């Protein structure tokens, strides 16, 4: 796929980011964590009518990829990528694996104490 012109060196973005999401700021599916892992659902042919950004995300996520990495590779704001990935997740075109919950603060303090004792 050839690289499309998203930026004009003098003017900045040709297409404002909010137009890519049609002004939406909330994902169609559940909230997606920054470090959630996105992977294209195997064996599915993308339906017609997807925007180019959706197709690029599907191509980039054939291997497990974190949401922040997708945003960085597309050079788009994280909020925009969250909405786009949410669209794909709602259509069951991608899987979203949420990160494990953070450990309890008490456990972290015990680990720190154990490390200091070494």
Image (cartoon, rainbow, N blue to C red):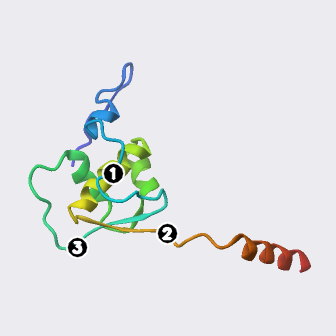
Near mark 1 (Cα within 10 A), the count class, few <14, some 14-19 or many ≥20, is: many
Residue situated furthest top in the rendering: 10
Q: Residue at x 37, y 51 (%)?
A: 82
**What label sits on residue 54 in the rendered view?**
none
Label 2's element?
loop
Counting residues from the start of the chain, the first of labels 1 and 2 encountered is 1
Q: Residue at x 22, y 66 (%)?
A: 92
Which sits in the foreground, 103 or 114?
Answer: 103
- The x, y position of residue 76, in whole percent, is 39, 41
- The x, y position of residue 60, in whole percent, is 31, 58
**Which residue is denoted by mark 1 in the rendering?**
27
Separation of marks 2 and 3 at Cα, in angstroms = 21 Å
Tell me where residue 46 sits by quadrant: bottom left
- The x, y position of residue 45, in whole percent, is 13, 65
Which sits in the foreground, 36 or 105?
Answer: 105
Nearer the observer, disc 2 or disc 3? Answer: 2
Separation of marks 1 and 2 at Cα, in angstroms = 18 Å
Nearer the observer, disc 1 or disc 3? Answer: 1
Near mark 3 (Cα within 10 A), the count class, few <14, some 14-19 or many ≥20, is: few
Separation of marks 1 and 3 at Cα, in angstroms = 22 Å
Question: How many marks on residues?
Answer: 3
Above or below, 24 against 112 in this view is above
Counting residues from the start of the chain, the first of labels 1 and 3 encountered is 1
**Which residue is denoted by mark 2 in the rendering?**
99
Label 1's element?
loop
**What label sits on residue 42 in the rendered view?**
3
Near mark 2 (Cα within 10 A), the count class, few <14, some 14-19 or many ≥20, is: few
Tell me where residue 93 sits by quadrant: bottom left
């Amino acid at each position: 796929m050839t690289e499309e012109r998203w930026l004009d060196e003098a003017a900045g973005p040709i297409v404002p980011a909010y137009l890519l999401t049609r002004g939406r700021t909330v994902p169609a599916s559940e909230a997606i964590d920054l470090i959630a892992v996105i992977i294209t659902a195997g064996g599915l042919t993308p339906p017609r009518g997807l925007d180019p950004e959706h197709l690029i995300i599907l191509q980039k996520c054939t291997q497990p990829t974190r949401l922040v990495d997708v945003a960085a590779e597309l050079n788009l704001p994280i909020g925009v990528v969250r909405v786009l990935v949410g669209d794909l997740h709602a259509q069951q075109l991608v899987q979203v694996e949420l990160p494990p919950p953070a450990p309890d603060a008490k456990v972290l303090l015990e680990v720190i104490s154990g490390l200091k004792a070494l």
